[in-house]
Image: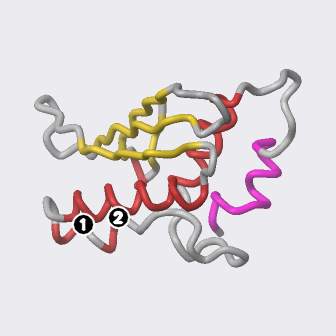
Amino acid sequence: MSTRGLLSRLEKGHLHPSSHKETPLESITRHLRVLLNTRRGESVSSPGYGILDFNDVVHSYPSALQKIQTSIRTAIQEYEPRLKNVVVVHVPDVHEPAALKFEITAQLALKGSREVLRFRTRVGAGGQLELW
């Protein structure tokens, strides 16, 4: 049974409102963690939600990097309307050459805002994307 499904998130309390009001950045970050750790096809109600399964492209590494970057950017553009001008760049790591790390840069799409947000990701154990 998948540990990323709605019921498991409810059990773990991930969908319960917190005691403090979230800032837009906290809300966006929380949503990106869910979005980027969902594989396309996992959501029955929205089959396009999520990113491609890394197992589908790992055999074509390093050319798979472009496919992964595109998948991340497309998912954010389609499912996170609070961000615009999304750019995803692979960040090579000289200390860990096989690590998949990306930097996401986007502009906050809230009215009157020119704020630019930066997120870093790393593909961790089991293909989970860590985001900070």
Residue lying furthest top in this view?
A: 20
Front residue of 88 and 94: 88
- The residue that disc 1 covers is 58
Disc 2 residue type (three-letter) = Phe
Few, some or many residues within 10 Å of mark 1 (<14, 14–19, 20+): few
What is the total number of numbered labels drawn onto the structure image? 2
In the image, is 66 to the left or to the right of 84? Answer: left
Looking at the image, is 43 positioned above or below residue 85? below
In the image, is 62 to the left or to the right of 17? Answer: left
Magenta extent = 2-14
In the image, is 61 to the left or to the right of 44? Answer: left
- Asked if the magenta segment contains residue 51, the reply would be no
Q: How is the image coloured?
A: secondary structure
Q: Position of residue 117 (x, y in %)?
A: 48, 29
Q: Is mark 2 on a helix, strand or loop?
A: helix
Q: Position of residue 46 (x, y in %)?
A: 66, 74
Looking at the image, is 96 positioned above or below residue 86? above
Q: What element carries label 1?
A: helix
Marks 2/1 in contact by CB < 8 Å: the verdict is yes
| Residue drawn at point x = 41 percent, y = 55 percent | 73
- The residue that disc 2 covers is 54
Disc 1 residue type (three-letter) = Val
